[in-house]
Image: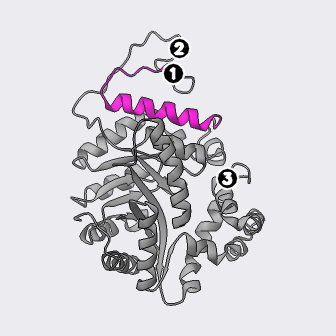
Amino acid sequence: MRLGINLVPEDCGRTAQEAERLGFDVAAAPEGFRSDAISVLGWVAARTSRIGLLSTVIQIPARTPVAMALAAATLDGLSGGRFRLGLGISNSHVTEGWHGAPFARPLARTREYVEVVRRTLAQQPVTNEGPHYPLPLPGSDAGAFRLPGPVRSDLPVYLAAVGTRSLELAGEIADGWVGVFCSPDHAKRALDAVRTGRRRAGRDLDGFDAFVSAPAAVGEDVRAAAAPIRPYVARFMSLGDRESNFYFRLAAGMGYEKAAVEVQDRFVAGDLQGAADAVPLEFIDATSLLGPPGRISRRLTEYAAAGVTTLGISPYAGSTEERIAVLETVARAHREAGLPGREG
């Protein structure tokens, strides 16, 4: 199991450089309300030389598939072939409210989107007869375009997935999976669904990257270490209504439905601190790296045993230097656990 770093825009260049120095395999950038992933990774690409670059994840409704393929090909070329394209359908709340795009039939939409992206990167004539991204537009007299120039046609595509059907789709059509809020046990169950999708496509898990994000906070007191992670979990549990919120359903499926209801009720009422306080410590502990180095080393071993191939660390601390110290602790714990890194 390799290590990744989940970046924040404020100090992305510095932390990516330090992660590269420490032997981390990949630097990952999210996309949402604060920043886009391509800009952050472009900045990081110019300041690093070896570490991989992964979007976790670019939101499908924010760009047409051809625009996405152009951006991916450009960043991959500028970085010397280091980019991995992570995509996600987002959720109805963000898709319809933030991007003004339809959310209906998300799995079919994702499948069609990935097909057009791959066709574009393969420098084939870009046509598509599907209902979501018809190319050329019906009734148009435009011909089919083709992406010119040198392009890495096998650029890896990852899919974010939470539910069983979306996990199976990731296994079927993608080269990697991006998971979040996963305990080792949940990651193992998720990979069973991914494996089903791989079998459907006539493949196994060889070469498939299971990238799971995990917050990390170092300290002797586990409860104190979890405190800065609470608002992050509360926000994701409270996105949209309970039926359409993947993260709410995930927490409920892990046995925390009663607590998740309280978190969302408090958050919607504007009681952000109360929502954060209502997040169960057990949920944070199960899905994070918390505590002293020895405890973190044991949890890394559990993730590796579950089949996670890259653990994306989100260091929680008050400053850039403190976040780098978290990365150093995790890297040391990773070595002490005997797990291979980029060089191993």
Report the residue at 45% width, 9% height from top. Answer: 141
Distance of label 2 from label 1 (alpha carbons): 7 Å
The residue nearer to you, when weighing 317 against 337, is 337
**Which residue carries the number 2 mark?**
138
Q: Amino acid at mark 2?
A: Pro
* Residue in the foreground of this view, choosing between 291 and 317: 291
Q: Give the magenta part as a residue range.
A: 103-128
Quadrant of the image occupied by residue 268:
bottom right
Give the residue at mark 3.
245
Q: Secondary structure at mark 3?
A: loop
**x, y percentage for residue 331?**
33, 75
Image height check: is 261 above or below 61? below
Amino acid type, callout 3: Asn
Q: Sequence-wise, which precedes: disc 1 or disc 3?
A: 1
Query: Is most of the magenta stretch helix, strand or loop?
Result: helix
Left or right: 89 in relation to 28:
right
Q: Residues within 10 Å of mark 2 (few under 14, many from 20)?
A: few
Q: Which residue is mark 1?
A: 134
| Residue type at the position of mark 1 | Pro
